[in-house]
Amino acid sequence: MVPEATDAAAVHPPASPPVTAITGDEVIRCIGLTKQFPGRGGAPSVMAVDHLDLAVRRGEIFGLLGPNGAGKTTTVGMLTTRVIPTSGQALVGDIDVVAEPALAKQLIGVVPQVNTLDRSLTVFENLYFHGRYFGMGAKASRAAANELLERFKLADRAKADTLTLSGGMAQRVMVARAILHRPAILFLDEPTAGLDPQSRIALWEVVQDLHAQGQTILLTTHYMEEADQLCDRVAIMDHGKILALDTAEGLKASIGADTEIGLQADGDLDALARVLESGDTVTRTQVTGDVLRAYLRGSARGALPRLIARADDAGYSITDVSVTEPTLETVFISLTGKELRE
Amino acid sequence: MTTAAITTDLATTTQPAASVQWSAFGSLLLRDALVVWKTKWAFLLRTIMQPLLFVFVFGYVFPKIGQGIGGRAGAAQFSTLLGPGLIAVAIIFQGIQSVALPMVQEFGYTREIEDRVMAPVPVWAVGAEKIVSGALQSVFAALVVLPFVYLVPSTPVHFSFNWPVIVTLVPLSCLLAGALGLTVGTRVEPRQVPLIFSVLVLPMTMLGAAYYPWTKLGAIPWLKWAVLVNPLVYMCEGMRMGMTNIPHMNGFAIYGAIIGFTLALTWIGIDGFRKRVLT
């Protein structure tokens, strides 16, 4: 069963999303996928992934966006055979990953969050042996390794010790390694976490390039820019559940506003929010921490002075103002009442 | 690179599972072989040093300075009984060195075993490969140590090889060593590594009938029975059975215990491996 979020579902998380039929074009399917970790030392058990329904279509970049601890990595863990679900089903292609993990592993390539390059081997050998593990012959594996090193601009590091690589390079080697056996699906778990901005953009280019060639990709991220820039569809996840699922544009449109004005002011922001909403300019407001976000139709031009004047009249002195378009962060805040970074 | 190289298609990636799995298993072994080859000098040093020093001090220096163990006649026999013991120690030590220590690292810090775990084989097979790889390295260790225990002692060494015993017991002992390595490697945290030596390796070797025949422990009955929990006892006695005419433990007991320990440690080791890999 596939959740397909409508605007209404996106804005009101408790409403269960309508479902559509599974077609042959879907290469990942989760049906009621659940993982509950037992509590340690008397702690209550943790519901990491909670009856997740999900379908990823062939050739798309699908993003799981959510804060740390949302259940993204556990979901990827279950789909990549490493985490055994408590209940539910996960299918890669037509293969049940729990029943036939060895077969499922043939279809997937995985780039985990941490550097898992084989320290005993060179960069080239990491790629070469990966091919061999997947049943490629010596010649084919060598050719594929060389090709990918060339393509990922790593040819000059072929003989390098993996410990000498920078974070961005190591990440590129891991992506190259993961796609060497031509997996049907590539999993990228927080692919740019900890990378400098330049390496991040370089990796985005690699991912976009793979996408252009038809590679199906499931990536997890807690960077809303990453989900926005790269993904065809984004599922917003929190507390083990998908709260909304749509294209980035669709998710942002679900906010029903064209402009987001962030205000900081002295005094009770909730009361100020009520003041601003009472006018006809602001469609809705949201207070998180010391920021009040007001959403408007149309541009801030004209509206902003009116808002400030209104706040002024009500006895608030505005200390900071920011004007942006709604982002996926806005969507996340509107769904959960908290920020992604929290 | 052409775009064709990474075009993905479910149909082309699904190969007959069995052939892929055997090929993957072989490639995992090949990877370990390459790593041993790259570190061959370290491999030789760690394999040779302990037995060489032992045989040099006790088999060469002691008799030369008139401090031979067990008097003049005993000293001659000591070199003969020490040889099989040191080979057995080299085998078990290699299991810890080549399987347990890297695995503690890989599970504890580097997570670098991840890629091998994601190879298209069942998780138990990746653990089993480690046992086989450790066993092969143990065979090499035994071969490397053999000339030293024969040539270094200053008193005559009398080996008489019983080949049927050797060709069966050496591989079995080596598998036992690999399985012990996997068991230890999957259950020890990195900060506990020094303890492996003081709590496991040292008592195992000192109380493993390596430096004395188990049959002579009749003089200390409680010790004679207590050391039977130590698999090294059977390996040393088995080596003595295969290489010398020195009285040894009953052959059936040796085979039975070695096979039993190998099976039990293989099960515990692979179970530990699965638990570390899967959550």
Image (spheres, coloured by chain):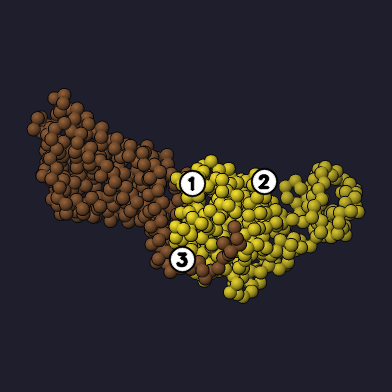
Q: Would you identify the image quadrant in which residue A235 lies? A: bottom right
**Mark 2 to mark 3: distance in Å?**
37 Å
Residue hosting label 3? A103
| Count of numbered marks | 3
Mark 3 lies on a secondary structure that is helix
Q: Colour of chain B?
A: brown
Residue hosting label 2? A198
Residue lying at 70% horizontally and 64% vertically, measured from the top left = A247
Q: Position of residue B74 (x, y in %)?
A: 10, 33
Mark 2 residue type: Gln
Residue lying at 21% horizontally and 38% vertically, measured from the top left = B149
**Mark 2 to mark 1: distance in Å?**
25 Å
Disc 3 packing (10 Å; few <14; some 14–19; many ≥20)? many
Pointer 1 indicates a residue of which chain?
Answer: A
Which chain gets the yellow colouring?
A: A
Q: Would you identify the image quadrant in which residue A24 lies? A: bottom right
Mark 3 residue type: Leu
Residue lying at 67% horizontally and 46% vertically, measured from the top left = A198
Between A24 and A276, the one nearer to me in the picture: A24
**Mark 1 to mark 3: distance in Å?**
28 Å
Q: Give left or right: position of A178 versus A233.
A: left
